[in-house]
């Protein structure tokens, strides 16, 4: 009889508990429905904002991987806001506090574990908004030079003139200086040379200027510059600086090649010598070890 009493008492308690839960569900049903509707609205809002952001990013960012990452972050932020608003409508303040605390701890742990990766990721985002470096540009950085093929969340891929690829972490690009040949349509080319001491310096200077200006005509506010720099061992050295269209390092090499050929032809036609070092060997040796000793 005692067991029957305990059994019926347990059933009664379970019934009371279920009745309390049912009452709580009925009382909170409007809030529950409202929370679901709010969360669905935030999902729709996240999708709409992602499409708008994608259209805006296509104007500024060519890198597909960067655009996708930014859109995913936006979606995540909007969905999380909707999730927290829904929890607030359900009066789950304790659950909301626990979720936020757990997210903070997990975020801190992930940030410490992926410190280097996150550094490269944020650097990639920064690079994607920099107008100074874009896909297709020819850059020189970290002792490498080449055309930018891709910018992703981890690194930059450049193709060197020897057709090999170099992968450089994004943080290296952000922290180190880089030179962009494509950012300016014109660049100054510097060429060093020398003439014999017996040459007419004024005539050689005028001939060189006329030769270069004929091949590389300067634009307004540009000037072909010729300066003698030093008395060398076998020549009087000079430097000539002129302007040309440059988008990569190959254009500079091509301009130097054309200038060297033209200057050499002009000097040969006017009997101006480009000397080279000459060594004179003196075979006379008055202190030869093989010299016979004089009679004492």
Image (cartoon, grey):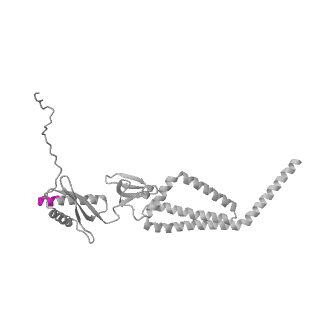
> Which quadrant is the C terminus positioned in?
top left
Viewer-proximal residue, 10 or 175? 175
Classified by dominant secondary structure, the portion drawn in magenta counts as: helix
Residue ID at (24%, 65%): 225
Check the image and name the residue furthest to the top.
296
From which residue to which does the magenta span run? 264-271
Res. 213 image quadrant: bottom left
Q: Residue furthest bottom?
A: 220
- Picture coordinates of residue 215 (x, y %)? 20, 65
Q: Please tell me whether residue 263 is drawn above or below residue 290 in the rendered image.
A: below
Name of the residue lying farthest toward the left? 295
Left or right of 158? Residue 86 is right
Q: Is residue 206 magenta?
A: no
Residue 57 screen position, x and y as percent: 46, 66
Residue 4 vs residue 45: left or right? right
Based on the picture, tell me whether residue 269 belongs to the magenta stretch. Answer: yes
Q: Residue furthest front?
A: 296
Q: Nearer the viewer, residue 159 or 264?
A: 264
Q: Nearer the viewer, residue 115 or 73?
A: 115
Q: Position of residue 284 (x, y in %)?
A: 12, 39
**How many numbered badges does the structure rendering display?**
0
Q: In the rendering, at what x and y percent does residue 114 appear?
A: 52, 52
Residue 106 falls left or right of residue 246: right
Q: In which quarter of the view is residue 193 placed?
A: bottom left
Q: Which residue lies at the image location 58% right of the left edge and 63% below the top edge?
A: 79
Q: Residue at left 82%, top 53%?
A: 10
């Amino acid at each position: 009889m005692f067991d029957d009493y305990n059994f019926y008492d347990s059933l009664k308690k379970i019934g009371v508990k279920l009745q309390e839960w049912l009452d709580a569900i009925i009382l909170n049903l409007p809030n529950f429905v409202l929370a679901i509707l709010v969360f669905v609205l935030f999902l729709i809002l996240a999708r709409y904002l992602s499409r708008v952001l994608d259209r805006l990013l296509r104007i500024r960012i060519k890198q597909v991987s960067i655009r996708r990452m930014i859109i995913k972050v936006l979606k995540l932020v909007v969905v999380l806001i909707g999730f927290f608003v829904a929890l607030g409508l359900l009066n789950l303040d304790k659950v909301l506090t626990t979720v936020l605390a757990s997210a903070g701890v997990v975020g801190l742990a992930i940030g410490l574990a992926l410190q280097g990766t996150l550094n490269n990721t944020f650097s990639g985002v920064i690079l994607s908004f920099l107008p100074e470096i874009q896909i297709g540009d020819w850059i020189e950085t970290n002792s490498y030079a080449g055309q930018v093929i891709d910018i992703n969340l981890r690194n930059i891929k450049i193709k060197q003139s020897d057709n090999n690829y170099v992968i450089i972490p994004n943080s290296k690009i952000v922290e180190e200086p880089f030179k962009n040949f494509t950012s300016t349509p014109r660049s100054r080319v510097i060429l060093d040379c020398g003439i014999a001491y017996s040459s007419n310096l004024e005539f050689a200077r005028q001939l060189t200027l006329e030769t270069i200006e004929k091949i590389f005509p300067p634009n307004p506010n540009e000037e072909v510059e010729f300066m003698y720099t030093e008395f060398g061992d076998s020549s009087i050295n000079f430097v000539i600086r002129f302007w040309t269209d440059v988008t990569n390092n190959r254009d500079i090499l091509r301009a130097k090649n054309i200038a060297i050929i033209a200057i050499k032809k002009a000097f040969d036609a006017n009997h101006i010598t480009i000397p080279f070092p000459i060594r004179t060997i003196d075979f006379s040796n008055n202190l030869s070890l093989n010299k016979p000793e004089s009679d004492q």
